[in-house]
Structures are given as C-alpha cells and as structure tokens.
Amino acid sequence: MVEPNDHLKQARERVESPRSTGQPLSRQELAELVNAWVYDNTKPPRVIEISANYIGKLERRKISWPQDPDVRSGLRAVLGAKTDAELGLRRPRRARSTVADVDRQQFIKAALGVTAAAVGRQRGLAELVAPTQPTPVPSVVGLTHVDEVRAAAQVFSSMDARYGGGLIREAVRAQLRYCVELLNAACSEQVRAEMFSAVGYLAHVAGFMLFDAYSHDDARKIFRFALQCAEEGQDWHLRAKILSSMARQEIWCGDPDAGLTFIELAMVRSDRLTSTERAMLHTGRARALAKLHRIQETATAVGVADDEFSQSRPENESVYVRYYDQWQHLGDTGHALWDSAMDGHFVSEARHRLATAVDGHGAEFVRARTISQIKLASLVMATGDPHEAVAIGWDALDAAGALRSRRAADDLRDLRQFGDRHRKETDVAELCQRIGSAVVIT
C-alpha cells in the first residue's frame, strides 16, 4: 500500500491562504502560486498549468516525484522548504521489469478506461472527449498571455471569414469563457489594459459568428461585453469595430435606425480613428440610409466613405480592420447601393462595385465574396438579363456549399424569389430548384 505524502500536506497547511484569513492554503491556491512563481522566475517567462488535482496526486503519492524541475523549485519556494526531501518528494528508483513483461492490450484498455465495445457506442465516445479537469487559469498573466488571446482571435476570425459562423461558434465561445477568467488574474496596469483589449477582440469575433448564425440575442449580449472590454482597455479602434458590427446586425435585422445610432456612437472622437476605420463607419451609415430609402443621403455617405478610404495606409492599420481592403470596401459600398439600385437608382454603379469585389476577393474571404456574388446575381436578375444572372448565381451557389452562414442562405432565398419572375426560362427554373434544395445551410 502506498503511503500518503504527509510532509507535503503538512507543509501546505502551514501556509495561510491568501484569500481566507486564518485558513490553510488550499490545493488550488498552492497550484496557482506555483504556476505564478514559475512564470515570474523563468526567462523567458514560462507558463505551466499544474492544478489542484495534480497537488492531490502528489499528496496521495500517486505522483512521488515531479519530473519538471521548475515545479519542484516552485513548490520549495512557495512552501518555504530548502530541499525536496522536506516536502516528501522522492526520486523514483529504476524499475527492474521491462515493457515486454506487460500485456500491451490490457495496458491500453486500462489507460483508456473503456472496452472495445464501448468505443463503438456514442455514449462511450462522448465520455472519451469530455474533460475531467478544467484547464487551470493562471493566477498571474503577462503580455505572453495577451498575445495568445489575440492569436486565438485571429485564427477564429480567419476561419469565420472562410467558412462562416455556423461551424466553429461553440469552439470560440468555449475559448472566450476561459479567456474571460484571465481578466481576474494578477498583472500590471499595462497588461490589464492590453488583456481587456485582447479579450474584447475575441468576444467581437464570437459575437459576429453568432450574428452570422442568427443567434441574435446571444450575439447582442457578447457584443455588449466586447464593447465594455474595449472601453475598459481604452481601445478606440476596437470600440469602433464593435459598434460597426453592432450596427450591421441591427440593419440586417430590420432596424436601420438603431444601426445609425451605433454608427454615430462609433464616430465619437473620430479624430482618434484611422481613415480606413472612418471609411468602414461611413459605409455602415450608407447601408442604414439605403434601408431607409434615403437615396441621396446614401450616395453622399458612399462618397465620403470613398474619400476616407482613398487616404488609407494599410501599414498603419490595427488588426481589427486589416481585412478592410479595396475589395471589401467596394463590396460593402456595393451592398449599400444595392438597395438604392432596387429602387431604380445607381444600378450600374452598384453592379460595378459588387462585380469588382467578387473578382478581387482572395480565397481567405469566401463568405464576403459569396455574399457579394449572390447580391450581384439578384441585382442582375431583377434589373438585367436573367440568363446572365443564372451564370453568376450558379457560381455563387457552388461557393455557398462550403459555407455555414445563415446570412448567405437568406440571400440565396432572395435570389430565388427574384428568379420566380422568370420561371418560364429553363435555366432560371433549374437554378431556383437547386437553391430550394440548398438553403438548408445553417
């Protein structure tokens, strides 16, 4: 029978909890203090994530010797021990038996904790991937953690642009829940502001995915949280981007007045924003005005957006608007003019902008290119040659097959409605029929 490590347990209980006066240090607190000590005393700072469960295994001597020397150093430092032996840590003796003495099949089954039959059942598979121990949150964070959060936001944002918000939104929400806990960790004031900004960026990505997937109430909640983070971190660039996305959601949901309000809020202290950011916001204003059928004001807003974008300096832009290149600008302003075109105004200009955006978008912007292509097909179907619209529509429908975007699916439904006017044309009828089968996209 393995004897417990009473030395380690007693050493822990001699240290007072930093959170509960008069109470001994808990296993979780010891784990967090060791994690923090290692981060503060290694160069470059090293992140480890031992947990209360790990400390418990040491005390029960399920683990007799931490293999990581930094962990042993952290335990000695936190518990005031001079040697590992004072903490009851024992270096294991070399075992005499060899791997050949082990029944490998039995070993694998024991390690997995399931039988071969259980693997074949969905319930067994779910148990395999279910976490038994949450990822521990470090008690001290630095700029390395900030960079990791921003990197995660960029990866998710890239996947969203390529595949749509319906595919990975649960993954980004899980990551966001973890990163929110980092805001409670100890850090310098500089790191705290940067961390609020990074978490706000990730929250914005999560919110936009939810918007694209039509989880509108959840998206609004996440957007509000992201906005609070941006303001807490005094990140004016992130604030503008979040408010722009909030405006886009309300415009999409049929409330352009609310969209205009968010744009006006974003334009507060516009002198602190870049030309690209101002172009993005004026484009948002144009989209709201177009939905309100304010034709001339829409055109004016597009003109102002064009003027601002002409002064863009991509090398000076924040990460939040690096996606907003020439093709994105043309696509977004083309969307604004699309509503006016459906009222009989600026048809050729809307068509030109959308077509140029479709031709220019790179492979990493599948959703933006596809939505612009669907809008272009609808515009041509409604105002031009339906056979040309069919050719554009087939390409858009093929691209949409790789997306999980409710917005793209709804735009396809609109294209089918415009095509209903030309159902007597065989190619139009075929396109409409295929759209009817494809709009189960979620």
Image (cartoon, grey):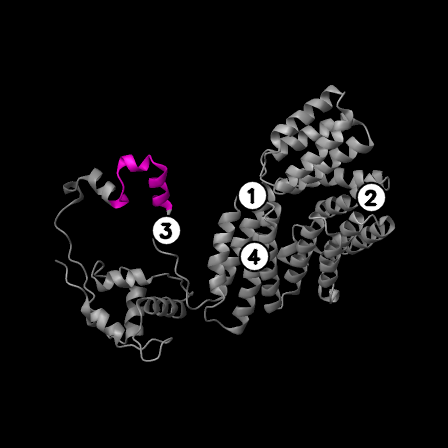
Task: Write down the quadrant of residue 376 in the picture.
Answer: top right
The answer to whether residue 312 is seen in the rendering is no
Alpha-carbon neighbours of circle 4 within 10 Å: few (<14), some, or many (≥20)? many
Badge 2 element: helix
Task: Write down the quadrant of residue 375 in the picture.
Answer: top right
- CA gap, disc 4 to disc 3? 23 Å
The residue lying toward the viewer, choosing from 96 and 219, is 219
Residue position for label 4 = 203
- CA gap, disc 2 to disc 1? 30 Å
Alpha-carbon neighbours of circle 1 within 10 Å: few (<14), some, or many (≥20)? many
Badge 3 element: loop
Which residue shows up at 59% across the image and 42% down it? Answer: 162
Alpha-carbon neighbours of circle 2 within 10 Å: few (<14), some, or many (≥20)? many
- CA gap, disc 4 to disc 2? 33 Å
Is 322 a magenta residue?
Answer: no
Residue 340: which numbered mark, if any? 2
Question: Amino acid under label 3?
Answer: Pro
Alpha-carbon neighbours of circle 3 within 10 Å: few (<14), some, or many (≥20)? few
Residue position for label 3 = 131
In the image: residue 201, left or right of residue 339: left
Badge 4 element: helix
The residue lying toward the viewer, choosing from 102 and 232, is 232
Which residue shows up at 57% across the image and 47% down it? Answer: 158
Q: Which residues are magenta?
A: 111-129
Percent position of residue 327, x then y:
72, 44
- CA gap, disc 2 to disc 3? 52 Å
- CA gap, disc 1 to disc 3? 23 Å
Residue position for label 1 = 166
Percent position of residue 338, x then y:
78, 42
Q: Residue furthest bottom?
A: 22
Badge 1 element: loop
The answer to whether residue 192 is seen in the rendering is yes
